[in-house]
Amino acid sequence: MRIYTRRGDSGTTGIHGGMRVPKTDARIEANGTIDELNSIIGIVRSFIDDGEKDDILREIQMNLMTTMSIVATPSELRDINPRRLPADAVESLEMKLDAITEKGCMSQEFVLPGGCKAAAFLHQARTVCRRAERQLWRLNEQDKVDEDVMRYVNRLSDLFFAMAREVNCDEGVDNERWKRFGKAGLLE
């Protein structure tokens, strides 16, 4: 079996339902960014020695594959796509966020992205996830995106932020503080 089809040589690509759209289409841009995010998570997993964290990241990768299938499907055809995020996907991310917060790795400070390799790539995952979310909202202006997808991606960027800080804490690496925030605004 050949991996190439030559059908995309004209600048179009197929989406769920058989329709072809330009490779610059908002749906393709969003899915390309989600795919990029999934690849970064694969990099993070190569630096993580913690089985529980690896399981969390693998679950996220599986959910992102499902997300790409949902995003690749125009809203009027969504009922024919059997792919769905797990009913508790957003709640699961929130529970993981709460658990990290309870560990005490989160503070009221803005931190510089970085630290150990896994944390640095988690920060990159966070920023790519936020770009994916912006692109999903752009697509939503043209064709309604599944609400569960929107909520999941929003919560996911928060989780990557928290996980980056947690991984640094676990590795004994300081989360480099930029500025603290509070009632009076940003303080040095």
Image (spheres, rainbow, N blue to C red):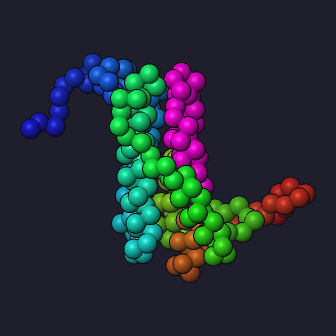
Query: Which of the two residues, 87 or 144, is positioned nearer the viewer here?
Result: 87
Question: Is residue 25 in view?
Answer: no
On screen, 56 above or below 38? Answer: below
Q: Which residues are magenta?
A: 132-159
Farthest residue toward the left? 1
Query: Which of the two residues, 69 or 179, is positioned nearer the viewer here?
Result: 69
Residue occupying the point 37% across, 40% down: 83
On screen, 126 above or below 44? Answer: above
Residue occupying the point 51% across, 23% down: 143
Q: Name the quadrant of the N terminus.
A: top left
Residue occupying the point 32% across, 19% down: 19
Q: Name the quadrant of the C terminus.
A: bottom right
Membership of 23 in magenta stretch: no
Instruction: Give the total number of marks visible in the rendering.
Output: 0
Residue 132 image offset from top left, x and y in percent: 51, 40
- Left or right: where 162 falls relative to 19: right
Residue occupying the point 37% across, 20% down: 22
On screen, 170 above or below 124? Answer: below
